[in-house]
Amino acid sequence: MTVQRWQVGVATITSVVEDEIHHIPPEFFFPDANAAAVATHDWLVPDYADASGNIALRVQALVIDLPGRRVLVDPCVGNGKVRAIPFWHMQQYPFLERFAEAGFDTASVDTVLHTHLHADHVGWDTQLVEDAWVPTFTNARHLYTERELKWCKAGGNPGIDGVYDDSIAPIVDAGLADIVDEDTDLGDGLRLESSTGHTPGHVSLWIESMGATALVTGDFLHHPVQCEVPAYGEVGDEDVEVARATRRRMLTRACETGALMIGTHFPTRPAGHVVAHGDAWRFVPEG
Ligand SMILES: [Zn+2]
Ligand SMILES: [Zn+2]
């Protein structure tokens, strides 16, 4: 697989793909959608949907390189995790091999950011070594928001036990965890913005460098069809109405700023621009 990279000022953003699945019936993730409805948005074909309206989704981590700094965002599902959802259960993805092929060493990551603490955004934080979950990114500060940590610790992942215990507790126990505010400046042009709704303490990442702007969505948005139909809630949205309002607010900002938006679960060509279309938007991929 070709490694996808984007330049935003002095920041280089690299996608490390864990998995990408095509031809998914949309109602599997979007209860209010179906293939016939998605097929009417023909601009989604072929990158984001097939001609019959079935969709594609990706699981990827993003590496942001800045002078003297390497940040990893949302380290995917991970390997060997016991999960009630079959397609996340006991996986053996070649993720760390792809991470190395992209030119990265786990020891070189200095910050791990989590847009939220769903099981598909924290997995590679730990690896199973001799029956114990140990940190993968041993030199990194791992950032969490307080609301999200509390929600996850209380069993927030719907129907999935063990996420806190196997993917977060080992980080806390190793002294590698930091609590950050939901709206906070991380320095070097990196800024978190609260984008609650999908989960209570969800955040998105703005990257600003030399007049250029990028936005890493996390899961306030899952698929480009939600640009044109922001009302489509995703099955994991905790507060559907708040998630809808957040989607409209963030898409408005992405459009106004001309940001390069990188959809955390967008397949094929995940980076592009949000352009106004009627009373909503469309997504125009770059590259
Ligand atoms: Zn999520
Ligand atoms: Zn997700």
Image (spheres, helix red, strand yellow):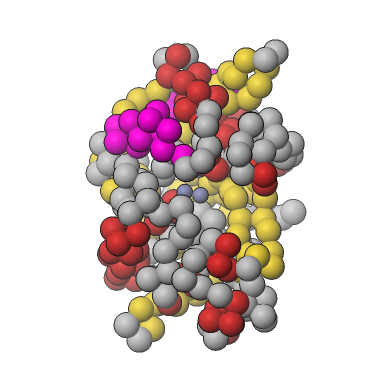
Q: How many marks?
A: 0
The residue drawn where x is 59% and y is 19% is: 133
Quadrant where the N terminus sits is bottom right
User: What span is in magenta?
Assistant: 136-157
Quarter-wise, where is residue 232 in the image? bottom left
Residue 152 sits above or below residue 202 on the image = above
Q: Nearer the viewer, residue 283 or 258?
A: 283
Q: Is residue 147 left or right of residue 221?
A: left
Question: Is residue 48 inside the magenta stretch?
Answer: no
The residue drawn where x is 37% and y is 47% is: 199
Q: Nearer the viewer, residue 14 or 198?
A: 198
Quadrant where the C terminus sits is bottom right
Q: Name the outermost residue toward the front.
A: 159
Question: Is residue 150 inside the magenta stretch?
Answer: yes
Q: Is residue 274 visible?
A: no
Q: Nearer the viewer, residue 10 or 276?
A: 276
Residue 193 drawn at (x, y percent): 29, 49
Residue 73 drawn at (x, y percent): 48, 42
Q: Is residue 186 left or right of residue 275?
A: left
Q: Is residue 201 left or right of residue 111?
A: left
Residue 145 drawn at (x, y percent): 32, 35
Quarter-wise, where is residue 282 in the image? bottom left
Q: Is residue 285 visible?
A: yes
Residue 3 drawn at (x, y percent): 67, 52
Residue 220 sits above or below residue 166 on the image = below
The residue drawn where x is 61% and y is 44% is: 85
